[in-house]
Image (tube, grey):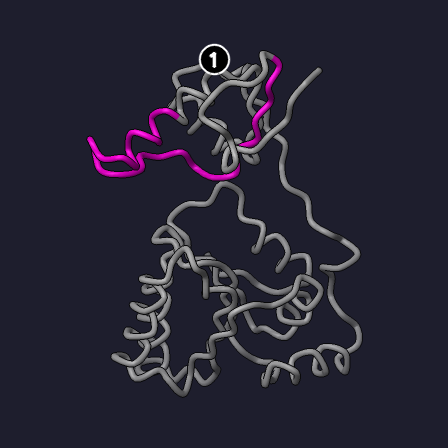
């Protein structure tokens, strides 16, 4: 029998000699050297190295895995993410888009960011660039941030709110904590552009979904 699991729920003890583990994010160095976080990260790397096969969601992530674990490349298989093509597509009914957006107090014609607040997501620089576009290039559209409220990044969320106030963007930036998956196509269709400013991504599903809706993506 084969056991398939994911890196983010992987235990620290090996439970099968026929284990396949999917990895969705760059492994990178985590935690301070000598600290508990770093120790657990090292143990997880050892566990990953014991798997019979590893699945990466992009070729870039595969190379990161090979380099980080020091294993042969043929032990890592790339299987790209897909997207729900029946859901994420250009919407011919503008009324449907407007109806969804109205429930969130929005009108079409905004810049959109969808994602979390992990440091790699680079959200503070999005806000700084947006401020520059408003003041120096007369940009006249709001910025909508979706999905940034998370119990995992409470400190980052507080910093982002403080930065919004410091930049004087309270009237221009809308924060929407959670958008159900079935509403996202309307958000993408109503956007002028979707912003994907991450320093790195294991794959980048949001840009793929946005482009499937016919919306330009700024990376």
Q: Quadrant of residue 90?
A: bottom right
Residue shown at 56% from the left, 33% from the top: 6
Q: Is residue 81 above or below residue 77?
A: below
Q: Is residue 33 above or below residue 125?
A: above
Most foreground residue, 142 or 165: 165
The residue singled out by tag 1 in the image is 72
Q: Quadrant of residue 76?
A: top right
Q: Is residue 200 above or below residue 58?
A: below
Expressed as whole percent of the image width and height from the top left, the position of residue 142 reads: 47, 81
Residue ranking furthest to the left = 34
Expressed as whole percent of the image width and height from the top left, the position of residue 14 reads: 51, 18
Magenta stretch in the rendered image: 18-43
Number of callouts: 1
Position of 5 compared to 1: left or right?
left
Expressed as whole percent of the image width and height from the top left, the position of residue 110 reads: 53, 78
Q: Quadrant of residue 57?
A: top right
Most foreground residue, 192 or 48: 48
Q: Residues within 10 Å of mark 1 (few under 14, many from 20)?
A: few
Q: Is residue 70 magenta?
A: no
Q: Looking at the rendering, in which quadrant would you find the N terminus?
A: top right
Residue shown at 37% from the left, 73% from the top: 130
Expressed as whole percent of the image width and height from the top left, the position of residue 109 reads: 57, 80
Q: Is residue 33 magenta?
A: yes
Residue shown at 57% from the left, 31% from the top: 22
Residue shown at 28% from the left, 75% from the top: 162
Position of 34 compared to 46: left or right?
left
Most foreground residue, 151 or 100: 151
- Dot 1 falls on a residue whose secondary structure is loop
């Amino acid at each position: 029998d084969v056991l398939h699991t994911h890196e983010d729920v992987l235990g620290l003890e090996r439970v099968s000699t026929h284990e396949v583990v999917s990895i969705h994010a760059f492994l990178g160095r985590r935690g301070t050297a000598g600290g508990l976080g770093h120790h657990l990260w090292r143990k997880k790397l050892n566990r990953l190295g014991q798997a019979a096969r590893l699945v990466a969601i992009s070729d870039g992530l595969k190379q990161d895995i090979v380099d980080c674990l020091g294993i042969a490349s043929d032990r890592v298989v790339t299987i790209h993410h897909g997207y729900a093509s029946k859901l994420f597509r250009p919407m011919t009914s503008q009324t449907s888009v407007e109806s969804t957006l109205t429930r969130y107090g929005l009108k079409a014609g905004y810049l959109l960011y969808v994602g979390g607040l992990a440091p790699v997501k680079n959200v503070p620089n999005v806000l700084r660039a947006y401020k520059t576009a408003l003041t120096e290039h007369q940009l006249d559209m709001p910025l909508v941030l979706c999905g940034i409220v998370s119990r995992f990044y409470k400190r980052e969320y507080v910093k982002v709110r403080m930065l919004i106030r410091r930049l004087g963007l309270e009237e221009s930036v809308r924060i929407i904590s959670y958008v159900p998956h079935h509403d996202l196509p309307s958000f993408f269709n109503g956007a002028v552009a979707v912003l994907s400013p991450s320093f790195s991504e294991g794959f980048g599903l949001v840009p793929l979904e946005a482009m499937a809706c016919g919306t330009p993506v700024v990376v």
